Amino acid sequence: AFSLETTAISAPLPPRTSRYVRLSGARTGCAEAFGPSSATGALLPLASMDATNLEQSTIASDAEVDLGSDISKPKAASVDAGAGRRRMFIGCWLASLLVFFFLPRNPNVQVKEAIVSAEFVIVGLSWLFAPMGLFFTCCDYLVAFKPDAAPEGLRDKFEKTRQVWSGIFRVDVPSLYFYGFFGTCKCSGLLAVLGAFGPSFGASVTGNIIWLVLLLASVYHHIKKKESPALVAVGLAIMTLRFVVVECKHYGR
């Protein structure tokens, strides 16, 4: 008769051995615990097995070569169980998001929520751009009204910019008027974007358009001077996104 024998080993085992040795397909006719012999495959009493035979039997048991049984490994089982729990958690989280977003709701409530969300986005983008806009404005005013206080590198850079636009329009505009004008445009646009002229749609869009024109022109003359427009491009992206949100909020009501 063929049967499955599971024997608890009380003696200290080598590090790779497990607490249980499972024997499958071993012919037995007594109540003693037996282990497989590494040489002949005959059954030996567990008490008579030396450390070498015990290690070999354990390795054979782990490799499932001679025994042919499905020996479970606790570590692999725990890893599989942990991965299964993680997949279940991620699935439940995604399902809850889908239910939240696709459940039918009151259209009026949806519109109000969209308007409030758009307001937060507009305010956030405005204040995100504010330090950059203030920096550009101060640089223009510094070069226009206090050129001696400006760093030499900044003066040279702004002089090249003035020459680019003077060459395009074929008019040599002095630095005072050139940067004084653009500094005032930037200051007015920044105040309008931040709501200094009131929360009206017209003021907000006007300030946004002013900065879009100025930033597009700045990207152009940076490329013309073979300079990197990275910083200006970031500001242009912020103001473009703000303009889209303002338009959607106004015409989506």
Image (spheres, rainbow, N blue to C red):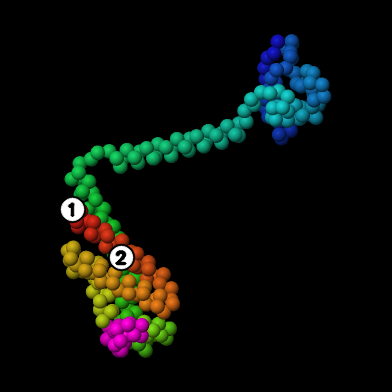
- The reply to whether the magenta stretch includes residue 25 is no
Q: Is residue 9 found left or right of 219 in the rendered image?
A: right
Left or right of 69 on screen, residue 95: left
Residue numbers of the magenta segment: 162-180
Which residue was labeled with disc 2?
239
Label 1: element kind: loop
The outermost residue toward the right is 39
Task: Please tell me the numbered disc located at residue 114.
Answer: none
Which callout, 1 or 2, points at the residue further toward the start of the chain?
2
Query: Where in the figure is residue 167, as x and y percent of width and height?
Result: 34, 85
- Which residue is at 34% across, 67% downward? 236
Residue at x-position 64% and y-position 25%: 70
Name the spot of residue 231 as percent of width and height, x first.
39, 70
Query: Horizontal and vertical percent for residue 97?
Result: 35, 41
The amino acid type of the residue labelled 2 equals Met
Look at the picture and state if 236 lies above or below 27.
below
Residue 232 vs residue 246: left or right?
A: right
Amino acid on which disc 1 is placed: Arg
